[in-house]
């Protein structure tokens, strides 16, 4: 028995050491999450408007076009749960915050990141420890092996890292023209992926948004919920029940809370084909347009006296 | 000629062998009490049931599955026949 | 939890250590608790309850049968207890299927009328352990084994986690004596067990899941394909299901071996079978022995005076039921029926074929054997069309189009060949230089050749090179889309 334990230990030690080394190397690679965390650490005190949310905000909100100092804190697939956690984390730092922008899209209330690999990013880089699946405590176990090797090779050999965010948090990826732009295909695909099979996450997400709004109320922050404009090719495949439920809920939040506003750009006619990178994301032109609209709404609020 | 009550066990074995050789169409087969179905190449599941039916005919007995199932070799089969026919060895 | 999950990689060593640490008379208890914890990971408390009930019920029934005075009483008790067990299985697994089909039938006569259709129930492992319980009761009835006096041992016999989810279906006289035996640590058992486990893991996550990449695009969207892609996908599936299930079985046998248990071999090079009958002596052996002993033989016995017809009918019924066991859908029924037909017809022509071969001197011909293997493999692969297709319509489409020589080129150009020969398929997402691939294949070949005891006679460096290589191959080449085991659904 002792012989067995010794041999097993000898066998696993090199494996563990290699694993730890790979893990360390993976964590050192710069990424969007690290970049945004650095921005929070350095400049959170200056942010007057913060936009969280998922890829609609990531591709659609460019703080450059805001009149006041803004930051885009969204990430791919970020859910209301993690919007809340990020706010909780930087609550004390966001002293000048007056406006919080949150996209309410088709899947905002039905999505959940539970048991998806993206949560490792929140655990490792945002230090949000509320995650239960130990697999996601590490880089090496969260993603398939070949993807990890690819990451290592491209950073340490080719010296390129997949940084897609600028200093304001806005995504640089979508400012380039899309070589595979196919609104028909992508619209259908994305709508299908985001259509929920059930509403099991609905109540939880509602609670998260509730808490976000409560905290904002306490801090005197105005919450602006907005449904981003959608290209017809995407919109036509949406399940109307899920869509309407989502919009109704957003509207009710705005009705019941004095510090909450809801803007529905879903059928906004001013967005054309050039404003979209694909059926569900914005090009830089589209981001400029959307941000301008949000900016003018904020300005109007600034001008009106407090009711 | 054999007479019912004076048949000896060996004769039963001989009669069994005859039946089995006939069913499997192989005169070269020799059986001992230790022989099992695995020892004989032609003894598959079809042959198995055919042999059982033939033995039933030969000795004028009727078997149940619970008689047949536990049998592990020719010797046990022979004992079963003795039991069923009441022929003393 | 399944064998190829992190949870199991943590669970197994913990159970092993506990098992070693505890006094011998409590070891069965450790394994029993571990087995229920293992089953509990599926988060279906009803399953645990059913397992416990079936165990307790069969334990008591077995005792009763053993003690029963008259043969008639014994038979009655047997029939009753088997009925209860099978009723549970039917209720949990087939109720939806029965209700659906009943509704179809009713609907044909009186449209608008229907009985409410029940919610489908998770029934993982049920088919396996209920069959094992039935085997226990029948063996007591036939006098092959006595009833087990120790309830804890019996409970372990029923629930032992290496074999719980997908078999092998163990016989009382095979497993119970091993449970009773005092345990002595055996270094070679552990080594062998780990190697078996690793080999099974390799077969599953590297080979079977990789073959699925060929099979799934076609079988999940059959309308889009005709001709050659359908053939390739079907053959690929024949191998996928083998490696998947053999992989699982190796992991099961390996896990059991760690604790000194030898479970039954389930496979013996099934695709080298020279006939369908031979195939079933090599494929899912614990299951085919079960249907042979408890369905075929009783039926054959009952119909013995019908000669060949009796045997043929018994085969048809047996394999029809075998199809039903595999799943509550007509696809599986047809699959089983096809095997039944193949086997039934062979009872008629086999004696003549044997004579013919003898006459022509073909009996020991190498070419004959190769031809028979080829035919058998194709027959079996044909039946897999029904096994894998998502519906009868799909199966029909495949059969109708599989020989479509003309259309296939279009299909290959537009969809087919991309899926099959894409750079991704062979080696995951990375292009690996052919030399490395060759190296890996040779390592696999070496491990395969030595995966029984002979590896341990080789020098240390050789063994450890094999261990590390196997580990690396599993980690690097595994297919990342986590898929379940195929036989888990049965």
Image: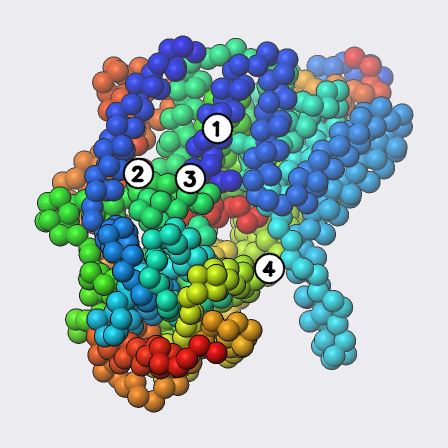
- Mark 4 lies on a secondary structure that is loop
The x, y position of residue B88, in whole percent, is: 82, 14
Residue A278 appears in the picture as rendered: no
Q: Which residue is mark 4?
A: C329
Within-10-Å neighbours for mark 3: few <14, some 14–19, many 20+:
few
Q: Which residue is mark 3?
A: A134
C154 versus A234 height, above or below:
above
Q: Residue visible at 78% across and 44% down?
A: C83
Task: Choose the circle earlier in sequence order: 4 or 1.
Answer: 1
Residues behind callouts 3 and 2 on a single chain: no
Viewer-nearest of labels 2 and 4? 2
Q: Which of C488 and A104 lies nearest the eye of the viewer?
A: A104
* C127 lies left or right of C374: right
Q: Residue visible at 27% across and 21% down?
A: C464
Q: Which residue is mark 1?
A: C12
> Residue lying furthest bottom in this view?
A269
* A53 lies left or right of A171: right
The x, y position of residue C321, in whole percent, is: 64, 50
């Amino acid at each position: 028995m002792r012989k067995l334990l010794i041999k097993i230990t000898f066998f696993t030690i090199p494996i563990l050491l290699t694993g730890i080394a790979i893990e360390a190397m993976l964590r050192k690679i710069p990424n969007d999450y690290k970049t945004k965390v650095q921005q929070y650490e350095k400049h959170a005190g200056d942010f007057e408007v913060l936009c969280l949310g998922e890829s609609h905000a990531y591709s659609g909100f460019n703080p450059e076009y805001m009149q006041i100092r803004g930051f885009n804190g969204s990430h791919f697939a970020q859910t209301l749960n993690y919007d809340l956690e990020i706010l909780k984390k930087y609550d004390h730092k966001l002293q000048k915050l007056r406006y919080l922008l949150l996209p309410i899209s088709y899947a905002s209330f039905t999505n959940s990141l539970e048991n998806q690999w993206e949560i490792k990013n929140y655990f490792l880089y945002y230090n949000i420890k509320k995650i239960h699946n130990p697999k996601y405590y590490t880089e090496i176990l969260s993603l398939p092996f070949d993807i990890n090797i690819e990451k290592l090779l491209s950073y340490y050999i080719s010296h390129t890292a997949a940084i897609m965010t600028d200093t304001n948090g806005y995504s640089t990826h979508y400012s380039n023209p899309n070589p595979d732009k196919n609104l028909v295909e992508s619209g259908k695909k994305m709508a299908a992926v985001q259509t929920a099979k059930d509403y099991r996450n609905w109540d939880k997400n509602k609670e998260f948004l509730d808490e976000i709004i409560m905290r904002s109320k306490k801090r005197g922050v105005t919450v602006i919920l907005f449904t981003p404009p959608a290209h017809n090719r995407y919109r036509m495949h949406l399940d109307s029940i899920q869509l309407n439920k989502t919009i109704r809920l957003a509207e009710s939040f705005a009705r019941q809370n004095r510090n909450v506003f809801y803007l529905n750009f879903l059928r906004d006619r001013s967005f054309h084909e050039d404003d979209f990178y694909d059926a569900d994301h914005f090009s830089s032109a589209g981001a400029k347009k959307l941000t301008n609209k949000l900016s003018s709404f904020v300005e109007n609020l600034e001008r009106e006296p407090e009711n | 000629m054999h007479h019912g009550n004076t048949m000896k066990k060996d004769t039963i074995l001989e009669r069994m062998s005859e039946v089995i050789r006939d069913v499997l169409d192989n005169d070269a087969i020799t059986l001992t009490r230790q022989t099992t179905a695995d020892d004989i190449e032609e003894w598959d599941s079809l042959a198995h049931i055919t042999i059982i039916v033939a033995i039933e005919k030969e000795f004028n007995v009727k078997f149940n599955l619970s008689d047949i199932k536990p049998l592990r070799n020719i010797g046990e089969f022979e004992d079963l026949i003795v039991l069923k026919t009441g022929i003393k060895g | 939890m399944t064998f190829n999950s992190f949870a199991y990689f943590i669970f197994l060593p913990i159970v092993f250590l506990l098992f070693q640490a505890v006094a011998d008379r409590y070891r069965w208890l450790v394994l029993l608790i571990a087995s229920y914890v293992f089953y509990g990971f599926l988060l279906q408390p009803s399953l645990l309850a059913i397992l416990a009930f079936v165990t307790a019920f069969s334990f008591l029934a077995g005792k009763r049968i053993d003690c029963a005075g008259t043969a008639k009483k014994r038979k009655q008790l047997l029939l009753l207890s088997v009925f209860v067990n099978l009723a549970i299985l039917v209720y949990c697994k087939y109720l939806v299927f029965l209700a659906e089909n009943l509704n179809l039938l009713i609907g044909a006569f009186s449209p608008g009328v229907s009985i409410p259709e029940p919610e489908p129930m998770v029934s993982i492992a049920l088919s396996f352990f209920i069959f094992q319980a039935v085997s226990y009761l029948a063996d007591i009835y036939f006098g092959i084994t006595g009833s087990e006096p120790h309830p804890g041992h019996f409970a372990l016999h029923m629930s032992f986690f290496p074999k719980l989810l997908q078999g092998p279906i163990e016989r009382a006289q095979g497993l119970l004596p091993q449970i009773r035996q005092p345990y002595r640590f055996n270094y070679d058992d552990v080594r062998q067990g780990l190697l078996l486990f690793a080999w099974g893991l390799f077969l599953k996550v590297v080979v079977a899941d990789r073959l699925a990449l060929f099979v799934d695009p076609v079988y999940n969207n059959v309308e889009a394909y005709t001709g050659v892609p359908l053939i390739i996908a079907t053959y690929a599936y024949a191998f996928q299901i083998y490696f998947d299930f053999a992989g699982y079985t190796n992991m099961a046998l390996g896990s059991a071996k760690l604790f000194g248990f030898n479970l039954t071999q389930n496979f013996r090079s099934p695709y080298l079978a020279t006939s369908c009958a031979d195939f079933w002596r090599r494929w899912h052996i614990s299951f085919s022995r079960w249907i042979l002993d408890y369905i075929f033989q009783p039926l054959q016995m009952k119909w013995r005076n019908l000669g060949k017809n009796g045997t043929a009918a018994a085969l048809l019924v047996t394999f029809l039921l075998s199809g039903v066991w595999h799943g509550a859908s007509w696809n599986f029924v047809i699959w089983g029926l096809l095997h039944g037909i193949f086997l039934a017809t062979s009872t008629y022509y086999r004696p003549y074929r044997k004579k013919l071969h003898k006459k022509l001197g073909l009996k020991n011909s190498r070419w004959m054997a190769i031809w028979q293997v080829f035919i058998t493999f194709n027959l079996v692969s044909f039946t897999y069309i029904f096994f894998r297709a998502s519906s009868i319509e799909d199966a029909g489409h495949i059969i109708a189009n599989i020989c479509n020589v003309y259309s296939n080129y279009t299909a290959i150009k537009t969809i087919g060949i991309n899926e099959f020969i894409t750079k991704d398929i062979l080696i995951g997402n990375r292009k690996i230089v052919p030399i490395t691939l060759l190296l890996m294949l040779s390592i696999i070949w070496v491990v395969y050749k030595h995966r029984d005891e002979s590896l341990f006679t080789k020098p240390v460096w050789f063994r450890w090179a094999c261990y590390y290589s196997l580990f690396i191959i599993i980690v690097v080449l595994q297919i990342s889309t986590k898929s379940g085991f195929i036989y888990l659904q049965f």
